[in-house]
Image: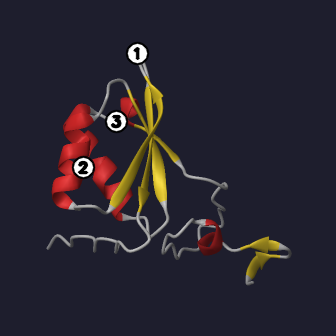
Amino acid sequence: MESTVAGEPDHQELAAGADHHCSCGELDAPGLPELDARTIPHAIRHATIFGALDGVGAGGGIILVASHNPLPLLAQLEQRSPGAFTVEYLEEGPETWRLALVRSATSQQRSPSLLV
């Protein structure tokens, strides 16, 4: 096991299934990171969530927090990445929904789009 600090696993090892290579010096907390969609401007909300999901590898994912049941988002996710994610409702309203979105072990990360 490689370490960046004596006795502490490096950033990549803690990013559950993610292919994260950076030198930011920060370590990911255990478990899935939480993304609160309520704080993201509506105009970029779905794109932001898809960007986060595109960045996780097999076995990785996020906890999505929303102010409503995100059925339209889940339909879009299934359309763009069929069968790639499992969805588990952790909390179901009436004011807050929390869902675990985890990339399946056989699913590949999407390549980020490069804008020229």
Q: Quadrant of the C terminus?
A: bottom left
Q: Which residue is mark 3?
A: 40
Three-letter code for the amino acid on which mark 2 is drawn: Ala
**Crowd tier of the residue under label 2, counting other residues whose Cα lies within 10 Å: few below 14, some 14–19, many 20 or above:** few
| Number of numbered markers | 3
- Which dot marks residue 47? 2
Q: Quadrant of the N terminus?
A: bottom right
Q: Secondary structure at mark 1?
A: loop
Res 44 visible: no
Which of the two residues, 89 or 95, is positioned nearer the viewer here? 89
Q: CA distance from mark 2 to mark 1?
A: 25 Å
Q: CA distance from mark 1 to mark 3?
A: 20 Å
Three-letter code for the amino acid on which mark 3 is drawn: Ile
Q: Secondary structure at mark 2?
A: helix
Earlier in the chain: of badge 1 and badge 3, it is: 3
Identify which residue is drawn at 31% across, 57% down.
51
67 vs 90: above or below: above
Identify which residue is drawn at 39% across, 31% down.
39
Q: Which residue is mark 1?
A: 94
Q: Position of residue 76 (x, y in %)?
A: 18, 48
Location of residue 53 (image quadrant): bottom left
Could you tell me if the residues under marks 2 and 3 are in contact, i.e. CB atoms within 8 Å? no
Which of the two residues, 82 or 76, is positioned nearer the viewer here? 82
Name the mark nearer the viewer: 2 or 1.
Answer: 1
Earlier in the chain: of badge 2 and badge 3, it is: 3
* Horizontal side, residue 15 vs residue 65: left or right: right
**Crowd tier of the residue under label 3, counting other residues whose Cα lies within 10 Å: few below 14, some 14–19, many 20 or above:** few
Location of residue 38 (image quadrant): top left
